[in-house]
């Protein structure tokens, strides 16, 4: 917020008479402008929420709205703590606990530039792992979200630290806390528990050091791309690792903390949101810096020209359950970057002429893991469109059912799964360079009698190809 109204006084003397004239006027913003400042209050919760206003708790969609409360019986310090009751999977009011704590009121916020971490004390009713805790999410721009994942809690109070990637960015932050926690056990039958958080505050610890930002998982990736396509670096993961009191702590960050650059901007440009736009044929390298520290990882892009449009699906939507296609509604969201151990695959989503595609580079094995299982009992085929610019490209698609135990055996790539999972394997071959090829794969073999609980597509081999229009269907 800027104060751009100034009042000044002008005195005029005329013919021996002294007149005092007050003149008030507006003028352009000058070097004298004073920027609005925001409180630098450190505390978020002590024995109660601190300075958040009256309307500050916003649950995520699908979470239990009443999961959070103030517990006046349990505390690390003082008389109360924040209590979180994670529900069972079958709770009709929500199957997980998750929300943001946001300062009430548009134009509000805090100046956090003098701190280097968010800290809190926590414990649980049993040893559990909390999926996400962080800050910076305000359900607005969400520019400066920072998240620490997989936080292990015990039955004893322990202090946890979430480093701030670049405090100078946080001069008006509304998102004071965010969390997401699911139950324990197999997918679909998780059991709930309770955990407590207390003494939530921002601090200047002075022990948050040796920062190392990462893009693309710290790898130097080479990728073939096309004019008019877009690559979202944020989707590939942006992280920063700190040494905190002798131990490494890694947080997920957002593009607003980074400064991106392209070695050849007329080949590909990159904006402040980490969105790379391919402009012309040629090669360029995308790199990044965070708070003056060069990020590990880079993206070398070679554009060979225009990508032909993938085929436009024509099957009726009523006959389709789509995994990935701009033509159909998505049956379930999926994880295209599961990070299997030993995998060399780099997967990025690009947009060419308004059409989204998945680009696979240096693939040995990876997967498309469905967030929710797909019931394909009434369906007969899997369709996928494939494009490559390399000769002799071959890879295997494994259609996986997760079996009765509800767990996907992603560690099994050779030979049959251990009996609970079923699969069907199809080799993609006979591809022509520079041309999209469509495949319609029957849901046959073992999967024919166990296709009501499909959980993934495993991709083995390649090494470089592009996929679009992935969906199950029946004629």
Image (cartoon, grey):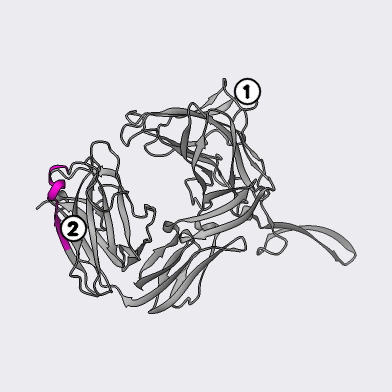
Residue 227 in view (yes/no): no
Seen as rendered, the residue at the extreme top is: 73
What residue lies at 61% left-to-right and 27% top-to-bottom?
76
Q: Which residues are magenta?
A: 439-450
Seen as rendered, the residue at the extreme right is: 16
Q: Where residue 25 sits: x, y (%)?
A: 69, 60
Asked whether 140 or 107 is in front, the reply is 140
- Determine which residue is flagged by label 1: 79
Asked whether 197 or 130 is in front, the reply is 130
Q: Where residue 370 sits: x, y (%)?
A: 29, 47
Residue 449 belongs to magenta span: yes
Measured in 3D between alpha carbons, the distance from the residue under mark 2 to the one under mark 1, in whole angstroms, is 62 Å
Taking the image as shown, residue 391 lies to the left or right of residue 5, namely left
Name the element at disc 1.
Answer: loop
Q: Residues within 10 Å of mark 2 (few under 14, many from 20)?
A: some
Taking the image as shown, residue 321 lies to the left or right of residue 137, namely left
Taking the image as shown, residue 214 lies to the left or right of residue 187, namely right
What residue lies at 62% left-to-right and 46% top-to-bottom?
117
Please give the label number shown on residue 141: none
| Quarter assignment of residue 375 | top left
Residue 30 in view (yes/no): yes
| Quarter assignment of residue 291 | bottom right
Q: Where residue 122 sits: x, y (%)?
A: 56, 32
Asked whether 184 or 415 is in front, the reply is 415
Residue 190 belongs to magenta span: no
Taking the image as shown, residue 203 lies to the left or right of residue 351, namely right
Position of 54 relative to 448 (above/below): above
What residue lies at 51% left-to-right and 53% top-to-bottom?
253
Seen as rendered, the residue at the extreme front is: 415
Q: Where residue 217 sits: x, y (%)?
A: 47, 58
Nearer-N-terminus badge (2/1) = 1
- Determine which residue is flagged by label 2: 426
């Amino acid at each position: 917020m800027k104060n751009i109204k100034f009042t000044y006084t002008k005195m005029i003397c005329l013919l021996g008479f002294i007149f005092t004239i007050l003149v008030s006027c507006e003028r352009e913003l000058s070097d004298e402008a004073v920027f609005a400042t925001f409180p630098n209050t450190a505390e978020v919760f002590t024995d109660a929420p601190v300075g958040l206003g009256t309307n500050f708790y916003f649950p995520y969609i699908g979470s239990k709205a009443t999961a959070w409360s103030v517990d006046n019986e349990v505390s690390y310090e003082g008389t109360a703590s924040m209590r979180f009751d994670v529900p069972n999977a079958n709770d009709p009011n929500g199957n997980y606990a998750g929300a943001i704590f946001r300062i009430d009121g548009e134009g509000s916020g805090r100046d956090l530039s003098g701190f280097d971490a968010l800290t809190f004390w926590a414990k649980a009713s049993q040893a559990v792992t909390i999926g996400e805790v962080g800050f910076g999410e305000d359900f607005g721009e969400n520019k400066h979200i920072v998240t620490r994942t997989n936080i292990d809690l015990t039955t004893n109070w322990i202090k946890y630290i979430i480093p701030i990637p670049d405090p100078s960015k946080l001069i008006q932050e509304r998102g004071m806390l965010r969390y997401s926690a699911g139950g324990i056990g197999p997918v679909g039958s998780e059991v709930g528990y309770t955990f407590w958080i207390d003494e939530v505050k921002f601090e200047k610890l002075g022990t948050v050091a040796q920062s190392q930002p990462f893009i693309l998982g710290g790898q130097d990736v080479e990728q073939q791309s096309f004019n008019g396509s877009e690559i979202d670096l944020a989707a590939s993961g942006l992280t920063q690792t700190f040494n905190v009191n002798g131990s490494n702590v890694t947080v997920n960050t957002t593009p607003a903390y980074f400064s991106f650059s392209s070695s050849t901007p007329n080949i590909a440009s990159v904006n402040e949101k980490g969105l790379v736009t391919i402009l012309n044929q040629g090669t360029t390298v995308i790199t990044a810096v965070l708070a003056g520290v060069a990020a590990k990882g880079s993206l070398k892009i070679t554009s060979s020209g225009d990508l032909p449009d993938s085929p436009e699906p024509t099957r009726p939507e009523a006959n389709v359950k789509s995994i990935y296609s701009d033509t159909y509604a998505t049956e379930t969201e999926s994880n295209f970057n599961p990070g299997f151990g030993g995998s060399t695959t780099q997967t990025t989503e690009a947009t060419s002429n308004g059409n989204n595609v998945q680009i696979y580079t240096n693939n040995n094995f990876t997967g498309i893991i469905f967030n929710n299982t797909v019931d394909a009992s009434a369906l007969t085929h899997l369709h996928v469109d494939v494009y490559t610019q390399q000769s002799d490209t071959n890879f295997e698609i494994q259609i996986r059912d997760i079996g009765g135990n509800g767990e996907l055996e992603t560690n099994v790539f050779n030979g049959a799964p251990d009996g609970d999972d079923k699969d069907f394997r199809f080799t993609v071959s006979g591809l022509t360079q520079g041309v999209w090829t469509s495949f319609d794969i029957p849901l046959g073999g073992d999967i024919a009698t166990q296709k009501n609980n499909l959980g993934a597509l495993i991709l083995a081999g390649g090494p470089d190809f592009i996929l679009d229009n992935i969906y199950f269907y029946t004629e």
